[in-house]
Structures are given as structure tokens and as C-alpha cells.
Image (cartoon, helix red, strand yellow):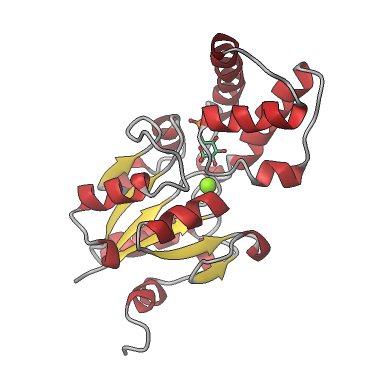
Amino acid sequence: QPIACIFDLDGVLVDTAVYHYQAWKQLANSLGFDFTELQNEQLKGVNRMRSLDMILQWGGVEKSKEEKELLAAKKNEWYVAMISKMTVKEVLPGTLELLKALKIQGVKMALGSASKNSSLILERTELAGFFDAIVDGNSVTSSKPDPEVFLKAAELLVAAKEDCVVFEDAAAGVEAAIAAGMKVVGIGNSTHLPGADVLIKDLSEITVREIEELKNPGTE
Ligand code: G6P
Ligand code: MG
């Protein structure tokens, strides 16, 4: 069976993590507290409302459901203003080369993201055309580390989980991929991603061949 690739978006294909951080920080500051970059790591891959819950807890702040909806909307407004100005230059190193190589090899590709803003980002960065399926925050109910997002992506690609390789920069996402029974390529800082089958700094550090090798180790 051929492999299928499922890519997380934020922090894997594009550098939006910095915008999420800025917008959440601005929100926390407006409520009178701050949080660290280390705490921010825990927000990666986690959906909007769950992120807000974690941040409010860090600040020791309690809000009603209605207030939380307003706060999340405010953060998203700031975030959307930032990503609306994104360009192809914000596509991370090696991404275009790898996606093109996979496409030429006929490898099926899906997006597996928690974001509800994925279509805007893919459009701004001109990446949309690479994907055979898109699963994002608008089509899943359970946030990573739940495997739902990746299982849905595999289903849309008509691929068995054993044939899927997930690309993730977040601990919650690596956990989700493992729970889905898939291979995982961890992107970014090694210390944050226990359980990944291989760790690379960015997509320039892996080839189609090496991705295929993950599924069938040792076969030449
Ligand atoms: C990604 C990011 C998270 C973000 C989530 C939801 O997983 O890593 O930091 O909270 O998407 O994004 P959204 O664009 O829907 O607020
Ligand atoms: Mg990510």
C-alpha cells in the first residue's frame, strides 16, 4: 500500500505560532496577567476554547460561558488581522519542495489541523492546491490529543492508518497521531515531542524516500 501524508498546519507548514502567541498574550494582558513561552508550548495543537480555558486557569481568572465566547472572539479578531497579511514567504523552509516532491510521486496528502482559520491561511500562503482533503477545526469535535482529526483525514484519503504518516510540531498532536495508530514525524524542538518516530527541525530535513522508510523500516 502507498503511504499517505497528513500535515498539521500551524508550526509545520507555516509559522503562525508566533501570531497565536501574540494574540493570546494580548488577551491575557488585557485581563491583567501574563504567561510564559513555556506555557505557550502547551497551547500548540490545542483548539481555541480549550486554549482559552488553560490561559484563564493560569491567570486564576474565572469567566462565564458567554464572557468566554466574547474573549475567544476578540483573540480571533486580532489573530485574523495578523494572518490576513500573511504571504508565501511565511511558508516554512523545505515545505514547498517536499509537498511538490510528494505530489509528483502521487502521494495522497491531507491537512489535519485544529484551526478554524486553515482555509484563510492556505489561501494566503498558496498551499491549498496540494491537499486532497482538509480536516480542520470546523470539521472535528474533539481537540488533539484526541485522534479524531487524523482518523477523519485518513478516511477522506481512503488510506489505512498503518499507511499514514503525520507531521506535527505539538505534543498534543504527536499524542493524537500515536493514538490514531500512525507514524509521526516531529517538527521543531526535540525536547517537547516525546514519542515521535523521527525528529527534524523543519521539512527541509526529510525526503519522500525517508518518509516511506518510516512505514517499512529496513526495506530497500
Ligand atoms: C492550532 C494551533 C493552536 C490553535 C488551534 C486553533 O492547533 O497550534 O495554537 O489554538 O490551531 O486555531 P484557531 O485558528 O481555530 O483559533
Ligand atoms: Mg501545530
Q: In which quarter of the image is residue 54?
A: top right
Where is residue 109? Give x, y as percent.
30, 54
* Residue 31 as seen in the image, left or right of residue 138: right
Which residue shows up at 61% across the image and 28% down it? 53
In front of the other: 212 or 196: 196
* Residue 188 as seen in the image, left or right of residue 36: left
Where is residue 116? Give x, y as percent.
43, 30
Check the image and report above or below for 196 versus 81. below
Where is residue 106? Give x, y as percent.
23, 63
Q: Quadrant of the N terminus?
A: bottom left
Which residue shows up at 45% across the image and 58% down it? 167
Q: In which quarter of the image is residue 85?
A: top right
* Residue 74 as seen in the image, left or right of residue 105: right
In front of the other: 128 or 197: 197
Q: Quadrant of the C terminus?
A: bottom left
Check the image and report above or below for 45 versus 31. below
Check the image and report above or below for 17 versus 189. above
Check the image and report above or below for 33 versus 66. below
Task: Confirm whether residue 201 shows in the render.
Answer: yes
Which residue shows up at 40% across the image and 57% down it? 179
* Residue 83 as seen in the image, left or right of residue 179: right
Which residue shows up at 27% across the image and 67% down it? 163
